[in-house]
Image (cartoon, grey):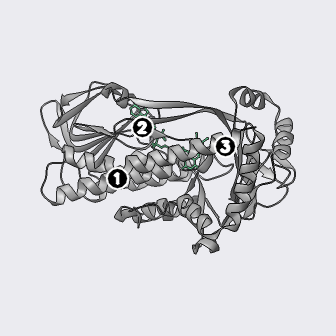
């Protein structure tokens, strides 16, 4: 383990990570457990406490974590903490065309895996990772601070915090979310596409149990997902992600809970019977963004800072965790070979391993959205035939399941 090296007015670290979200925290844990000296910055006032999350009513933001992400979190020692707070495994997925007759189902046993994934509250994942970080003396976290500027030489970048403190490092990593202030400071361009959707998020109780199944209806206005949640053994809860036009989302957000419940049950074809809305509705605008580069000398982007993706396939944080795992692998291999951290070839290798995979997932989401948003009768027919056809075609279905469970390409060691 290396100690922080004090210079006159700045601390030198191996890596400074800006943003303590799920992805930044995972990268810090991967580097920290290997003995690197890491500093982190986040404007949140303080870390989440495990005792305060995963209790009572579920938090509105949840993620569907793939078995690959689970393996990464297991290796970090975070998964047992997450499992002990609250997770809901799902063993089946059902997707149907709300405007037609196409229907497709996936089961874990068809893929030869015990589960297809877990629905987990984001706060639970983050609190577990922060609990692990708190036990790493070589990882320093600065809460209640933003990065005011990024400067220094490419080989010795430095961030200055709002309070004037300077943190120097061999590499700065932007893990500061979809609007990434650091990416903007660095002048890295993004391609951005307005999905034409806002996501309405809330928690419901349903008359029928969810049966460990994640369900999604593709409506003309966008996909509506009921993600299973089991609370204290009761499997009548679901987290809702309803992606729809901004106007429709605004209308739904303004409804009384009872009226929203009626709309949800109807739009979902009453597949889980009557619905009771338990929380207010939260609304998130959905844009797809992709950074044109994942690095420049001294700086790397990971997670939503590099790419933000429509939530219809629940891939965002899973892709971000893979970014963290691959970047950590490249940096640790370089360190093992005695190289300086953050040299351009390491960052180029990281970009090569991640950008293509993320780009194809973004393109796939665009394709889905356009196909299912289309009202043209030929497209409606095609997607109904397509969904039902895929359901009958074993190999294609297996391929889709591999994508959904994160089994794509060469995985980093920490995810195998
Ligand atoms: C409705 C919805 C549903 C979703 N469902 C799923 C799903 O089922 N599965 C899935 O995989 N993904 C899902 N996603 C995507 C997922 O939530 C994101 O991909 C994930 O949260 C990104 O994590 P992150 O750590 O990269 O960024 P964030 O979670 O955005 O974290 C960024 C951190 O950076 C900090 N920060 C911001 N500015 C600064 C600054 N100036 N200085 C320092 N720190 C800063 C923030 O405080 C924050 O802590 C969903 C997204 C939405 C909107």
Depth check, mark 1 against mark 2: the one in front is 1
Residue at (31, 25) in percent of width and height = 163
- Which mark identifies residue 371? 3
Relative side of 125 to 410, left or right: right
**Residue 122 in the image, given as x and y percentages of width and height:** 55, 48
Q: Are marks 2 and 3 in contact (CB under 8 Å)?
A: no
Q: Is mark 2 within 8 Å of ligand 1?
A: yes
* Quadrant placement of the C terminus: bottom left
Depth check, mark 2 against mark 3: the one in front is 3
Relative side of 147 to 6, left or right: right
Please name whichever residue, 66 or 30, is drawn nearer the observer in this view of the structure. Answer: 66
**Residue 107 in the image, given as x and y percentages of width and height:** 66, 68
Residue where numbered disc 1 is placed: 353
Residue at (86, 51) in percent of width and height = 270
Q: Quadrant of residue 223?
A: top right
Answer few, some or many: residues within 10 Å of disc 3's Cα (few below 14, many 20 plus, some between 14 and 19). some
Please name whichever residue, 146 or 255, is drawn nearer the observer in this view of the structure. Answer: 255
Residue where numbered disc 2 is placed: 305
- Which mark identifies residue 206? none
**SS category of the residue bearing label 3:** helix
Q: Earlier in the sequence, mark 1 or mark 2?
A: 2
**SS category of the residue bearing label 2:** helix
**Residue 345 in the image, given as x and y percentages of width and height:** 20, 47
Q: Earlier in the sequence, mark 3 or mark 1?
A: 1
Residue at (48, 48) in percent of width and height = 360
Tell me the distance, in whole angstroms, between the alpha carbons under discs 1 and 2. Answer: 17 Å
Relative side of 238 to 66, left or right: right
Tell me the distance, in whole angstroms, between the alpha carbons under discs 2 and 3. Answer: 27 Å
């Amino acid at each position: 383990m290396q100690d922080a090296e004090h210079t006159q007015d700045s601390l030198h670290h191996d890596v400074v990570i800006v943003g303590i979200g799920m992805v930044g925290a995972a990268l810090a844990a991967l580097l920290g457990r290997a003995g690197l000296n890491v500093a982190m910055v986040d404007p949140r006032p303080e870390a989440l406490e495990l005792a305060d999350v995963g209790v009572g009513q579920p938090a509105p933001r949840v993620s569907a974590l793939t078995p690959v992400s689970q393996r990464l979190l297991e290796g970090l020692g975070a998964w047992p903490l997450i499992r002990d707070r609250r997770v809901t495994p799902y063993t089946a997925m059902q997707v149907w065309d709300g405007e037609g007759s196409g229907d497709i189902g996936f089961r874990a046993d068809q893929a030869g895996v015990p589960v297809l994934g877990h629905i987990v509250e984001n706060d639970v994942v983050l609190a577990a990772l922060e609990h692990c970080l708190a036990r790493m003396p070589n990882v320093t976290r600065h809460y209640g601070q933003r990065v005011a500027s990024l400067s220094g030489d490419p080989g010795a970048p430095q961030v200055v915090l709002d309070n004037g403190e300077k943190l120097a490092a061999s590499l700065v990593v932007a893990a500061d979310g979809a609007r990434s202030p650091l990416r903007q400071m660095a002048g890295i361009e993004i391609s951005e596409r307005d999905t034409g959707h806002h996501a309405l998020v809330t928690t419901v109780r349903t008359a029928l149990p969810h049966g460990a199944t994640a369900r999604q209806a593709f409506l003309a206005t966008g996909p509506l997902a009921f993600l299973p949640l089991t609370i204290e053994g009761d499997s009548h809860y679901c987290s809702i992600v309803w992606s729809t036009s901004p106007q429709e989302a605004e209308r739904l957000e303004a409804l009384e809970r009872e009226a929203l419940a009626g709309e949800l049950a109807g739009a979902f074809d009453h597949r889980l019977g009557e619905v009771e809305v338990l929380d207010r509705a939260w609304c998130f605008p959905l844009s797809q963004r992709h950074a044109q580069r994942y690095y420049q000398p001294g700086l790397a982007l990971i997670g939503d800072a590099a790419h933000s993706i429509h939530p219809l396939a629940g891939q965002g944080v899973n892709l971000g965790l893979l970014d963290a795992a691959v970047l950590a692998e490249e940096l640790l291999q370089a360190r093992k070979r005695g190289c300086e951290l953050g040299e351009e070839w390491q960052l180029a290798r990281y970009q090569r391993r991640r950008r293509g995979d993320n780009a194809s997932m973004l393109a796939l989401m665009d394709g889905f959205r356009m196909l299912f948003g289309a009202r043209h009768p030929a497209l409606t027919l095609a997607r109904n035939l397509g969904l039902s056809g895929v359901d009958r075609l074993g190999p294609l279905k297996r391929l889709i399941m591999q994508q959904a469970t994160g089994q794509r390409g060469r995985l980093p060691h920490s995810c195998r």
